[in-house]
Image (tube, grey):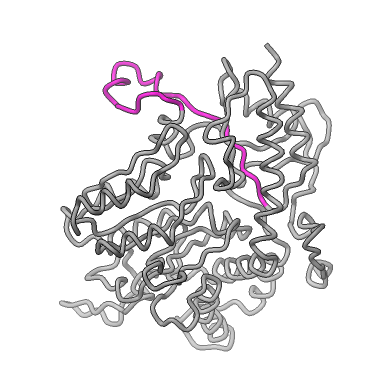
Amino acid sequence: MSNLNNEKYTIDEKNSDYRNMFLGVDVEFKLENGKKVIPIGFDNGATTPSLKCVFNEVYNNLLIYGSIGRGQGPKGELSTKKYEESRDRILKIFNLQDTNTHTVIYTKTTTESLNILANILIKHKNDKVLTTRMEHHANDLPWQSTAVVEYIDVDKLGRINIKDIENKLKKENGNIKVVSITGASNVTGYMNPINEIARLAHKYGAKIVVDGAQLVAHKEIDMKGKFPSEQIDFLVFSSHKAYAPFGSGAIVGLLTDLYSEKPFLKGGGCVDYVFDNKIIWSEPPSLHEAGSPNFIGAMAMVRALEELKNIGFENIYNHERKIKEYLIKEMKKIDNVIIYGDIENTEDRLCVISFNIKNKDCYEVADRFAKERAIALRAGKFCAHPYVARLLNVSNDYKDYEKNLNDADFGMIRLSIGLYNTMEEAKIFIEKLKEIALDM
């Protein structure tokens, strides 16, 4: 333990040893054939390893860990103080310091965050929400359950058109209450211009919600924007996709819009008084944090995000971009490999690459990568069924599959890069891909 606590490292922007900053990435595993190898983690879109500094932060806070806001005593009081101060640290990370407009609500996941917002922001079942066909289910299903959902479709390469968003907002003439959109796709890695979309949403009287789950660990997010009209009203994300896998998520949102008649989750901590015949609810953010707060998760989240900020998002993006460009260039050369999305103009793509091998089952291919070389990928529809169907150019109409739902079991293989990944790992992946793709 002491080695980790005392460890120091420096970051050279030109030749960064990012891998040394992470736990567990060099632990060997035994393959079925008995050979020991270091696994290659290419499924960072699902979850990420922990930064060493996060481990240290967790350890140090466990030493003073006490009940948050639920009792007296030095540990509880210090933990409560740090927990509340962490909200300001989060606001600073997203350029909202000294604005007094936003607050931070801690949740378990991005999914829970979006369900809470769907419950708060939608006042009537006929309220309209505008979203897109590239969304993760977490940014689709909660709105379907509370509002009337309008969709912006994607083009044949899987992108959305900003003009389509403005045209839809203009056509609805103020009836759209919320525009909810992903900051970056978990299938293609496309990054959407969220501040520009915010300007359009505000122009037509809507609030904007950004699903930042795939974005926060890879690109800087300026919620304040260059102009007031570009402000992001609500941002949601999970820390387990940003190198702090300790079960925490967050809503960073407009304080004035986080008041509601009743919270989505109910219990201790979200009320001021409970009488026999009346409940007096707390104000946000406490209103939406029923139950014992995840203090350790919050401390881990803040520390991870601050570390990424210290490294510099330009450095992070450039490191991952080089690997992305190499992978796409080499994958294009391999017969039988199909890459989805735009593979010529890739500046708006994070290093998320979805692909298939002709005439091979995606699940079987991913299984071979895992069993034969301990390369972690993801196979399936990535909780984005409508988007994957469009990229594969297959129907997503239930009537087409009603007689035989087995036909709906289409999918892809996804590779998603993290900061700790290396060019050497990318080269190993390419060699294995050649072997599997050419194995007829």
Q: What is the quadrant of the C terminus in the image?
A: top right
Tell whether position 410 is magenta: yes
Judge whether 437 appears above or below 139 on screen.
Answer: above
Judge whether 154 appears above or below 113 on screen.
Answer: above
* Left or right position of 277 against 200: left
Measuring from the top left, give residue 342's x and y in whole percent. Answer: 54, 36
Measuring from the top left, give residue 197's x and y in whole percent. Answer: 38, 57
Nearest the camera: 344 or 335?
Answer: 344
Residue 438 seen? yes
Residues in magenta? 392-418
Tell whether position 376 is magenta: no
**For the point 52% across and 64% down, which residue is it?**
221
* Quadrant in the picture for residue 386: top left
Judge whether 24 appears above or below 304 on screen.
Answer: above
Measuring from the top left, give residue 29's x and y in whole percent. Answer: 77, 39
**For the point 24% across and 79% down, which residue is it?**
280
Nearest the camera: 431 or 227?
Answer: 227
**For the point 76% across and 40% down, which residue is it?**
425
